[in-house]
Amino acid sequence: MTDVKKVKEVPVSWEALEDAFENNAPEVHSYLHVDTGEVIRIVDGVADPHLHQRIMSDPFYLRVEPVSSREQYRWMERFIATVDEPELHRRLVQAIDGKGAFRRFKDVLMSYPVDRERWFTFRSERLRSCMEGWLEAHDLKAVERPAWPVPTADDVKEQVVVAEESKGRRARGELAADQRGRLHELVDTLPARELNAALAFLEFLRERRHAPRPRAKVGSADESALETASEPSAEEE
């Protein structure tokens, strides 16, 4: 009985993987996380060498094998064969002759936006074919990545309220800190003989603030005075 290999589905970050397949610079090393589908790039001389060693030994990271420069050069040759415009065809043939061919090839296409877009499509199709073959060779299957949830109007309102409350708390904290600072400055300026009196007065204010206020009795003189004061006078009418 033939064993059937189990294919693992991975939510591949397709654009990042495409960049990794295209970039074959010797100092650049790309890895695919086989659980999250994220692609990370390690550059020699920039990244921590110990980090690179840990990633290389991590079974969840798979080294990406970029397309060789020779193969990508063949893609340019094949694309030029599809160009019908004589002047562009001639300039592209000259561009890929010698060192710096890839840069000159792209520079020429900058003046031909339609053919430039056609080249991007041409290259992406070949990169995708290489990536699918590479994933299949490692028993991996690319699946659609989960989309970020689109916030609703209520979500936005809630975030605004939370932000305003946080801003208010921060402002009150800054105000209290400023008041405490001013109080310290005032205490520092008081003469020693007046410090005890000032502290006693502050203690009196603190106790008064927290003490419950007595309620006025019905028919009391204070209430009668309040009612009299609230009634409009003849002159006001």
Image: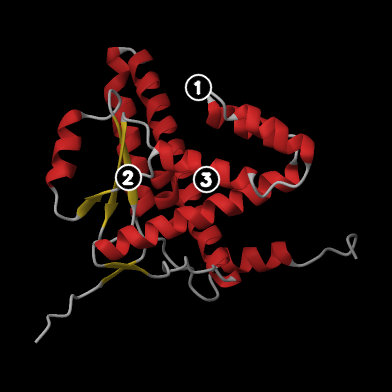
**Residue, x 44% and y 45% (percent of image)?**
19
> How busy is the neighbourhood of tag 2: few (under 14 within 10 Å), some, or many (20 plus)?
some
| Image height of 71 relative to 47, above or below | below
Amino acid of disc 2: Ile
- Tell which circle, 1 or 3, labels the residue nearer the N-terminal end: 3
Instruction: Please name which of the two marks, 3 or 2, marks the residue nearer to the observer.
Output: 3
| Image height of 231 relative to 58, above or below | below
The residue indicated by pointer 2 is 40
- Tell which circle, 1 or 2, labels the residue nearer the N-terminal end: 2
Amino acid of disc 1: Lys
Amino acid of disc 3: Trp
Viewed as shown, does residue 77 lie left or right of 68? right
Asked if disc 1 and disc 2 are in contact, CB closer than 8 Å, the reply is no
Res. 75 mark = 3
Disc 2, SS: strand
Name the colour scheme. secondary structure
Calculate the distance from the C-alpha at mark 1 to the C-alpha at mark 2.
29 Å
Instruction: Please name which of the two marks, 1 or 2, marks the residue nearer to the observer.
Output: 1
Disc 1, SS: loop
Q: Quadrant of residue 214?
A: bottom left
Res. 99 mark = 1
Calculate the distance from the C-alpha at mark 1 to the C-alpha at mark 3.
16 Å
